[in-house]
Amino acid sequence: MDAHSRGGAGDEIDPADQWVLNPQTGNYELRLDHSAGQPDSPRPRGGAPRSGAPRGGSGRGTRAKGDAPGDTDTDTASVPGSRTGSRSESRADARSGSRSGSRSGSRSGQRAEVPAQRSRRAGKGQPAEAATAAGRRKRKAKKAGKKKALLWTGGVVAFLIVAGSSTGYLYYQHLNSNITAVDVGTGDKGIANDKPLNILIIGTDKRTGAGNEGYGDKGSVGHADTNFLLHISKDRTNATALSIPRDLITSIPDCETKQPDGSMKVIPGTQAEGSNPRFNTSLGQDGRDPGCTMATVKELTGLTVDHFLMADFNAVKTLTTAVGGVDICLAHAVNDPDSHLNLSAGTHNVQGEQALAFVRTRHSFGNEGDLDRIKVQQQFMASLMRKIQSKGTLTSPSKMLDLAEAGTKALTVDSGIGTVSKLTDLAMQLKNINPKNITFTTLPVVDNPAEYPQHITVVVNKTQADPLFSMLQSDTSLTAVKKKEAAAKSKQDDLLKGSKAAADDVRIDVYNGGGPQGSAQETLAWLQNDKQAPKTTNKGNAPANVATTTLEYAPNQADQARTVAAWMGLPGSALKKGTKDAVGLEAMKLTLGKDFKGAGVPITGPAKVPDGVQKVEADKQVCAK
């Protein structure tokens, strides 16, 4: 294990030697002290309660965990390198009698000694005589170049041993008992492997936990303050994290929530028109649970949310501490009286209270609004991802254990991923995504025109947002878009070979045959205003709904059809050529099908990221300005 938590760097303890056979139990156990026998403990590090111990705190539709969301434990189990001896000692004392009772009389009241710890260097740690007395052979000196490989191998071997022992089972159960799960109707089916995955990450403004009462509204029920919709591609090679502003005016649909007695209750929704509800009230307000936020995201984006992860202020502190801090960059010095962040310009490693202060800072960056704070939070999340995937974390058993402890305590999840095994499945599906293939972007918005002269809230910029939603719906990565754009362009070029009519020569009758309500009028306005095609008419609803959008045209209207196909991104299958030429001022017939997502959104899927949409890849460190 690493020197950070297992002694001085000079000790160079072999990770495989941390695990020894306990002659009483017949199980391999982890030695926490370099020279003493192994204490009884279900967790490879101190401070973990037994799985059977009663745990306090319960909530509506939740499974209780060790600490209420946001509470801070007085011990420092989540801090790398710390451990509390009193708990493991009391467990050993309490169980020594029961263990000895199951053995022969000669063993009653005592336990056999676990073999002593070996050291790689003479004169360091346990004396060589003790190792010889324990029946171990002298080992040859190891080459320094093999240290990293041995550390990784030892960590894997240790994990396999602990997973197969009773100690490992108890620790596994302990981690399970840490998790708070909410039943939001996702069931317990776990992670689907054969389709794209949409996970909603919610950061609440709940102020519970030591030191958090002074941050703003300490009485908050916990609203959806920070929101990332993480879209993971079907092939698990890339991901897009879409930030949704908390102050976005959007409709909140009715949602069904599970009550403490097991009954179901429908929380009435709120329509954007008239009431102007903010996105952050989709959680907490009127008893809404994370399932209500998931439903709001679906109505907003058209994407079904599969699972959610929710964290409060305390989670930021414990997770950053568990990984040894997160690297951030400041373009200028910051001394913010509201968030209490006080750092010089340049790069810093932040954890705990300082990390929380960074993600909460608003008035010291950009226009001092929430949209600029979102950029700072994206930079922080990208850095946290890089840190977790770094060799310094993945090859450090102590950090991985700290991360498992902090993560299971800090996060609230849906019941579909509410066990350690299911969370592990999720992690395994994400582990191979390179940070350069993870893109952070923000939902395109504009200032709320209903607020003047001071704008407080925002509304969706449909011209930019609809193509972005379409990209996610068609599982198009923002990082892979250039390759897909080239393929789509090649197909479209073949389709559009030939002359194209000028915009003012294009005549179209528009019918809605299955698109969203108002699609025909929306398309008419887009054609006339954006494309400068005045000779278009809204014909209302089609005689019957159709699955796909079609454009019917006469042979002598082919130039007009190519123009419209280029505007709308129509595939070849959408073009229906007639047998007779059009007569006089006869118009083409455009029927919007169920595949129609919005005016200006290509039917075949977007060819490129809309201009003006902010995005940054997770492998890049950006300094907060």
Image: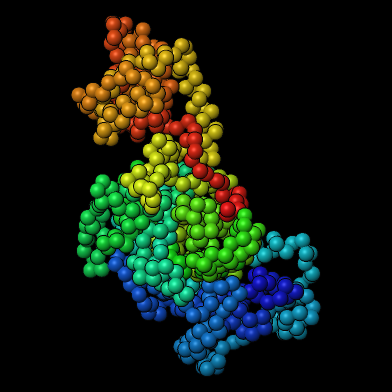
Query: Can residue 230 be seen at all in this image of the molecule?
Result: no
Number of marks in picture? 0
Q: Position of residue 225 (x, y in %)?
A: 40, 58
Query: Can residue 484 be seen at all in this image of the molecule?
Result: yes
Relative placement, left or right, of 71 versus 277 is right
Q: Position of residue 326 (x, y in %)?
A: 59, 62
Which residue is depicted at the point 54% across and 62% down? 358
Which residue is depicted at the point 33% across and 10% down? 554
Relative placement, left or right, of 568 versus 154 is left
> Height in image: 226 above or below 110?
above
* Quadrant that contains the N terminus: bottom right
Q: Residue 582's image quarter?
A: top left
Q: Position of residue 422 (x, y in %)?
A: 43, 59
> Height in image: 118 above or below 180?
below
Toward the front, the furthest residue is 453
> Height in image: 450 above or below 20?
above
Which residue is depicted at the point 56% across and 88% down? 111
Q: Position of residue 359 (x, y in %)?
A: 51, 60
Which residue is depicted at the point 41% across and 43% down? 446
Q: Nearer the viewer, residue 400 or 353?
A: 353
Relative placement, left or right, of 396 versus 417 is right
Q: Residue 186's image quarter?
A: bottom left
Q: Nearer the viewer, residue 221 or 299?
A: 221
Q: Nearer the viewer, residue 447 or 46?
A: 447
Q: Nearer the viewer, residue 279 or 578?
A: 279
